[in-house]
Amino acid sequence: MKKYLFLLLTGLTVSVAQAQEIKDALRYSQDNLNGTARFKAMSGAFGALGGDFSSIGINPAGSAVFSNNQFGITITNSDIKNNSNYFGTTASEKDNSFDINQAGGVFVFHNKNLNSDWKKFSLAINYENTNNFNNSTFSAGTNPNNSVANYFLSYANGVPLNVLEDSYYENLDHGTQQAFLGYQGYVINPVTADSNNTQYNSNVAEGGNYYQENTTYSEGYNGKLSFNAATSFKDRLYIGINLNSHFTDFRQSTVFYEDNNNALDSDYKVTKLQFNNELYTYGTGFSFQLGAIAKVTNQVRLGLAYESSTWYNLSDEFSQKLIAVSSNVNGDLPQDVVDPRITNVYAAYKLQTPSKATASFAYVFGSSGLISIDYAIKNYSKTKFKPENDYYFNSLNTDMSNTLDSSGELRIGGEYKINKLSLRAGYRYEQSPYKNGITIGDLTGYSAGLGYNFGSTKIDLGYAYAERDSQQGFFSQGLTEGATINSINNNVSLTLLFEL
């Protein structure tokens, strides 16, 4: 058996080879229902209404609907529960977070020239946390056939033995690093001792029934700062534009554990291991939005909005550690620890998310209430990593084009006013971005809330519920089995509005 290895190298290494996946692209392409409490209470159906800070994020013409200057801030408590099923074994994990998820202000300038058809002009600035990444999942169960050794084998086969024996972790690309970890941790062995050998076998005890656990913790946010301008023509047509600055900060820690009690002989076999991965992604982006709202009659309003792609510049930092225990009929050896203590800092790359179009309808029942409907469509197959002439990115973009699909989102909201009290409710349905409809399933959401108008001050409370099923593959190759995850998200928001 090869020499036990504990790497003492410490520091950062820069690499151009990385391993983005489709799930990484979707992380920055999908938005949660975030924003003001009124917006959430009506499930975000504001494309033809305006007059709300979060409505500006749907249709930028909405700021011209405001009558006076206004400032608002929203605090949100989000609770997410993930129920896992892995080969019939169920588990649950919860995560709770509290933050300021919206803050903004709008300035309305009324045209003093009464003969002009352009009645007012508005400028607004609004920040929203479009995606809260705080989340945790835990899955556990017994895989009857497949060991994590096959993950390392999928990268090792084809790599010369001398590369895995004589190289340093930090000098290898991502794929070869995985093979290196498996080899140095005794999880895989070469078929022959020849330095040119390129074929490997699993060194995990055979017999199936591998008990496996996968724990994932993530934290961070995806924020959007919108600079808005809009105008009103005859108080019948509202036109607006947003210039959006995006910024993201995402950290994820995964711990995979496997053990087995399969029959042993005099040869040492790996009977348990733990594989740790740490990912940190950060960057900025830009997008723009155009929109219009038409007041067809005093009751009927129509809205149309376009949101461009978001062009991100992202950077990744990645580190790994493997711990394995080998055993035979006489007992266990000390742990084999392969800990490079290296953070791979990958070359910056670009991500282009898909654009979105939203059509909206609203009917206003005078001062007593309203009903609003939005339908948005986004083609996730247009998502692209860049530069596109990069071999890996080109292959990944092809996979996304073949795997992802157009997704429609329906939002319905209503409001009923009793003097200064407003009662609200909503419904939301979003289709899966995948053609198979399974990897990430359809989302169904409900919402409710209320608000009270004190005059120059308003307070709103909103509750939103959303549920979605997904398949969480633990690894992208080798061990592709994963757990079925049922995610239930409950959040409560409180908004304070001050009118000047």
Image (tube, grey):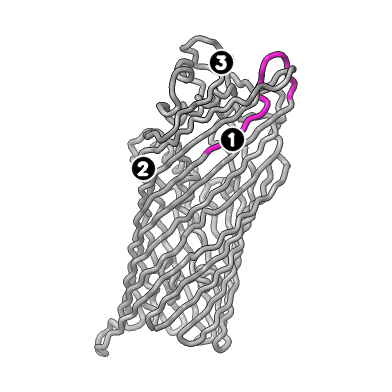
Q: Looking at the rendering, in which quadrant would you find the C terminus?
A: bottom left
Residue 272 colored in magenta in the image: yes
In the image, residue 176 lies at what x, y percent? 46, 26
Question: Which is nearer the eye, 421 or 459?
Answer: 459
The image shows residue 441, relative to residue 145, as above or below, that is: below
User: In the image, which residues are magenta?
Assistant: 262-277
Q: Which of marks 2 and 3 is in front?
A: 3
Q: Which quarter of the figure is the N terminus placed in? A: top right
Q: Mark 2 belongs to which amino acid?
A: Tyr
Query: Who's the residue at 44% across and 80% down the image?
Result: 498
Quadrant of residue 227 in the image?
bottom left
Dot 2: what SS?
strand
**Which three-letter amino acid code belongs to the residue tagged 3?**
Lys
Measured in 3D between alpha carbons, the distance from the residue under mark 1 to the one under mark 2, in whole angstroms, is 26 Å
Against 477, residue 284 (above or below) is below
Q: Is residue 176 magenta?
A: no
Q: Disc number at residue 145?
A: none
The residue under the point 59% across, 32% down is 479
Task: Report the residue marked by disc 3.
Answer: 2
C-alpha gap between disc 2 and disc 3: 38 Å
Q: Do the residues labelled 1 and 2 touch (CB within 8 Å)?
A: no
Q: Is residue 412 visible?
A: no
Name which residue lies at 60% across and 72% down.
448
Closer to the N terminus: mark 1 or mark 3?
A: 3
Residue highlighted by disc 2: 349
Give residue 230's position: percent from left, percent from top: 32, 73
Q: Which of 323 and 199 is in front in this view?
A: 323
Q: Name the residue under label 1.
A: 480
Q: Label 1 is placed on what type of residue?
A: Thr
